[in-house]
Each structure stands twice: as structure tokens, then as C-alpha cells.
Amino acid sequence: MSAVARLRSWEGLLLVLLVAIVAMNVLRSPYYLGVTNIANLFQLSIEKIIVALIMTLIIINGEIDLSVASVMGLSACVLAWLHQMGVPLPLAIIASLGSGLAAGLFNGFWVAYVGLPSLAVTLAGLIGFRGIARILVEDRSVGGFPSWFNTLGQQPVFGPVTASIVIFFVLFAIIAVVLHGSALGRLVYVIGNNLQAARYSGVRVKWVKMALFATSGLIAALAGLLYAARLGAVRGDMATGFELDVITMVLLGGVSIFGGSGNLIGVGLSILVILNLRNGMGLASITGNTQTSVIGALLILSVLVPNMTQVLQSRWKGRNT
Amino acid sequence: MKKYLLAAASLAALVCIGGIASAGDIAPGKSLDMVLLPKFLGILPFDQAHKGAEEAAAELKNGKKLQFLGPTPENSVAGQIEITTNATTQGVAALMLSNNAGDQIVPAAKAAQAKGVKVVTWDSPIPTSEGEDVFVAQVDFNDIGKVMADMALSTIGDAGGKFAVLSASPDAANQNAWIAAMKVALKDGKYAKIQLVDVVYGNDQSEASYNQANALVDKYPDLKLIMAPTTVGIVAASKAMQDGKLCEKVKVSGLGLPSEMLAYTKNGCAPQFALWSFVDLGYLAYYTAYGLASGAFKAEEGASFHAGRMGDYKITKDPTRAKGLRILMGPFTVYNKDNVEAASK
């Protein structure tokens, strides 16, 4: 791929956008380049961007997981519920991760083995898992976790970098290797591109889908725990609505909602674009409503631009022949 | 001679008292970056609080413009934490927070305090009070119960009769506390003739509240009054009685916003209702935060200060929480056909 072609690719576009946003932030706010601010920029959305990594695989695979935010809430509430009953926190953490894995296996079973559409299955999960979370802690706020747990979510482990940020980068590396350097990764693309062809050529479609949904549940549960540690208290409505932010990051990263195409570099860039944009707008004291509109406009553009260029190109060709 | 000395001494004492009393005076003209952070943007009470805070900012001649920043309703918790963190990064002098994140805001609020930001809560405090300097409370919960009992009595009249409560949701902590306070107040002998027959819930949704109000009238044919301690419920109940042409028989009262209740108060469906002024709440929160940030007084029990047109206030322990400090605004304003129009503007 020549340098020009690379620049004209979606990732190139995101990179240009990112540079523009960073430049604007540097010019507009003297606080932007502070080390703490850069760490905060990740830390404030860390749970979402962790989940976005596994969501990338799910969407490339041609599926979607709408239940991730509810699984985050569920895992946090399982933790809080067990903690209140006097269960030692390490055990509670294992149980909480287990609840996420179970939720993921549940989704995976209906999608992979029964063949129901993931949109419907995980929508049910979104409602159902949230319901269980709310039953567990009711209309209360549960806190009082041991200080090592809160420290884990709030204090940096080295420099300004928190444990959550380390986990994000480690997961990013692992998922990049799996998706772009392993046989499993190729299967994810193959299934996403053409499910029937994959089935006929003997790909273990069910197994791959099951594994993806189970991992999604597990990672969402981990993100829920990190969120609980960061806030130091748990409520039944925790992380409500986060699934849309996560999916936004993935789609803006150039992953096709129909599956089969996209890559983790694009999603990484899209995460940086959204986080820097939000942070810049926050430091410029722009309110929530405007921020949401700007990010919404960005997403519309991300869907429109590739499709429009295709349409225009084909019309152009049609005129010339 | 002795007399003179005595007089001089008492004069000196007076001067001293005067000196102490003015210690809490807030000097205007400082340039302090301040952020007013409501639960979310887009509803009237918070806009009114903003108006009050701007009024205070103008009086105190703050060189820096007040920042009114809020999240969207569906992103309230994460949004409040994000705004608090960004305000800390900017190194603002004070943050005025109507907390919607429960104790989840604590780490962000503590981080703000650690960087020297004064954190004043208003409307809704931080439950554990960690990360908070002081809470500016609208009214005392017990007062709310008493005011509702008084409105019920005066609306139903001396002849007495039955009334019912239309509340928000069964697990709304503030409404439940107010209803409990009203039940305690009703035990007084002077309310003997009015009888609370039921408490129903409209979940702060217009349609559900409207249906619940109609159901109450069906269930209790001799009902005289519906008491709705929620701004959504009171409007829905008033509309239900008006639509059913029942306003002569069943009156509505409770907690409401003048601008939303104007028509119903004028036409007699809801002859009186009460609320605290959100304009005043924003005004007082601003004076408190400005005073703390400028060092005029400290956030400690017994500190007092003068808040412009609203007069003198004192910081006390908060009796409604295990820990924490409170400034009690009070009192209620009871609205009727004489004052509702002016307040609705």
C-alpha cells in the first residue's frame, strides 16, 4: 500500500482527525498536556474502552453484544451483594467474574447453538442482567470495600498510570495478536464475511461464537469490577447505557456493522479520537448535551462518508462508460 | 468613674461582638473560578438555581464568569464524575454540586478537595459527606411534613374530611421521609378532623400519576383532597381533577412549581401548594462557595456568614446524616392565587 493510499484509508482519516483534535486541545487549554490530565482522559472512560476491544471481535464476527453494560452492572452488584454478606473480597471477585462468564455463555448458547439473532438475545440480556443487578442491591448504594480494592481503581501503580490503564494496554496487545496474528482471528473474519461459506468449509462456527460471547461476558465483568473500584461504591444502575458508547467507538473505528471487516488499529484510533474530543470539550467547559451532539455527528459522518464515496465513485464510473 | 469604666467596657464588648459578627462578612470583587453542577441539564428547577447563582455572582462582583455545566440525564453519574474531574484539572476555586451519583462521586470529590477545590453540595448531598465541605439544604425534612399537614387542614377546612397522598415512586428516599414526617405531624390534636386514607404512587410519570389520581377518586367517593409531594404528581393530579370537572369536590395540594401550577391555582383546582425557591437555593449555594473559596469563613461547625439579601446563615452539624455539615436555607414558600403569578415568571 503506498503512503497516499494508506492516508486515504479509514485509519488515515482517523489519524488526521486525531492530530487535528490534539492540536486544537493544545491550543485551547493549558491543562490538556498535563500528565495527570492525559491519565484522567483514559481513566474516565477506561471501562468502556476495555469492553470496546472485545466488542470489536464480536462485530467483525457479524454479531453484536448489547448486554455488556448490564453485565458490567451485574458483576459490580454481585460483588457488592457478596461483600455485604461478609464474603471475603477475593472470593467475591471470583464469583463476580463468574457471573459475567455465565452471562456470556448464556448469550453464546442462544446465538451459537440455537441460532437466534444476537441483537434479540443480547437485548434480552441487557434487560434481564440489569434486572438481576437491581434485585441484588435494590435502590441502595453499597460501598465500604477494603482500601486495597479502592486503591486498585483510584491510585496509580506507577507515574500517573492506574492498574486499569495497564490492563487496557495488555488486553489491546493480546486481542491484536489474536485478531491479526492467529488462526482464530482469521476464523473471526471468515465467519463475519460469509457465514454459510464458513459453515460449509467446516469452520467450527458455533465454537468460535460461543468463545467470543463468553469472553465478552468475562471482560465486561472485569470492566464492571474496575468501575466499582474506581467509584468506590456500587449502585444498581451502574454503567447504564454504556453499550452504546462502546459500539460507537467500534463503528467509528471503521468496523462494519455487517461484519467481516475492520481492524483493531482503527478502533484504537477511534478510541483516541473520542477520548481526546471529550476531554478537550470538557476542559473547554462545553456541556454534556453539546458533547453528545458532536460525537453523534461524528458517528453519522463515519457511516455516511464511506458509503457516500462508494456511491459517488460508482456514479462517476457509470458516467464515464 | 466606675460607671464610666463600666460603660467603656460594655462599649468595648459591643464593638467586639460587632467585630465577631462581621467576621463572616464576604468581601466582594475576588476573581474565583466557580462551577455550578446540577444533576443534569434541561429541567426548570436547575435553571432557576442557575439564575440565583448568577444573581449572587453579580452582587459579589466575581471577576470570573460562573460556569454552569451539567451532564445529560441518561449519563448523569458518569457525567458528574467527568465534570468534577475536569474542574479539578482546571484548578477551579469551588464546585457547587447537586449530587446525583450517591457515594460514587466520593473519589472524584476527594481528589478535587485535595487540589484545593471547595466542594459545596446543594439540593442533594453526598450521603457519607466524604469529599464535601458543606451541604446547603433547602428545607428541613420535618418542616416539609408539617407544611403538608397545614396545607391539608386549611384546604379541607374545619369541617374535616378524607385525603390521600399521591407520591413519586415507592422507594424515593426524600418523598418517603416527607410523608413519614407528615404522618408524625398529623398526630397533633389540631389535625384530628382530617384523615389520611391512602398513599399511592405515580412513579413521577405524568400518565401514571394522572391515572392514580382518578383511581383515588373512584375508590374514595368522599375524598376531599389529593396531596402530591412531587412536582410531577401535583400537575398530573390537578389536570385529572380539572378534566373530570371534579375541582369543586376534590382539591389538589402538595409540592409544585409555580410556573407549572399557575392555571390550576387560578381556577381553584389547586388553591395552595408549597415549594422552596430554587433561585434562592442557587443564590445561597453561590454565597457559601464564594465565601469558603475566598477564605471569609471555614467549613466548620458554628461558622456564620452574611448571604446578601437572604441574611445570616450558620453552619451546623447535619442531623439527617451520620456525618457532615449543613446550612439550612428554609423556609417554605406557600403559593396561592395571590402570589403564584409573580413567582411563575
Image (cartoon, coloured by chain):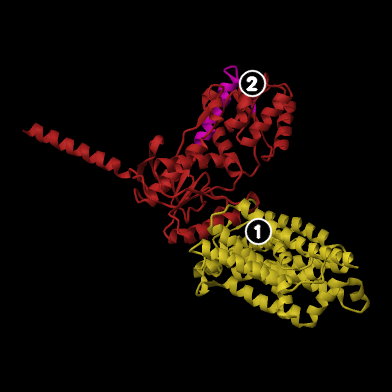
Chain colours: A yellow, B red
Q: Which residues are magenta?
A: B141-163
User: What residue do we see at 56% from left, 33% from top?
Assistant: B182
Residue B302 placement (x, y as % from top left): 35, 45
> Quick one: SS at disc 2?
loop
**Magenta-highlighted stretch: main secondary structure?**
helix
Numbered disc in front, either 1 or 2: 2
Q: Is residue B2 left or right of residue A257?
A: left
Q: Nearer the viewer, residue B254 or B296?
A: B296
Q: Residues within 10 Å of mark 1 (few under 14, many from 20)?
A: many
Q: Chain of mark 2?
A: B
- The answer to whether one can see residue B30 in this image is yes
> Quick one: SS at disc 1?
loop
Q: CA distance from mark 1 to mark 2?
A: 45 Å
Tell me the tag on residue A239: 1
Q: Nearer the viewer, residue A64 or B195?
A: A64
Residue receiving disc 2: B267
- The answer to whether one can see residue A224 in this image is no
Residue B224 placement: quadrant: top right
Residue A78 placement: quadrant: bottom right
Residue A104 placement (x, y as % from top left): 76, 67
Query: Split into 4 quadrants, where in the image is the N terminus of chain B?
Result: top left
Q: Residues within 10 Å of mark 2 (few under 14, many from 20)?
A: few
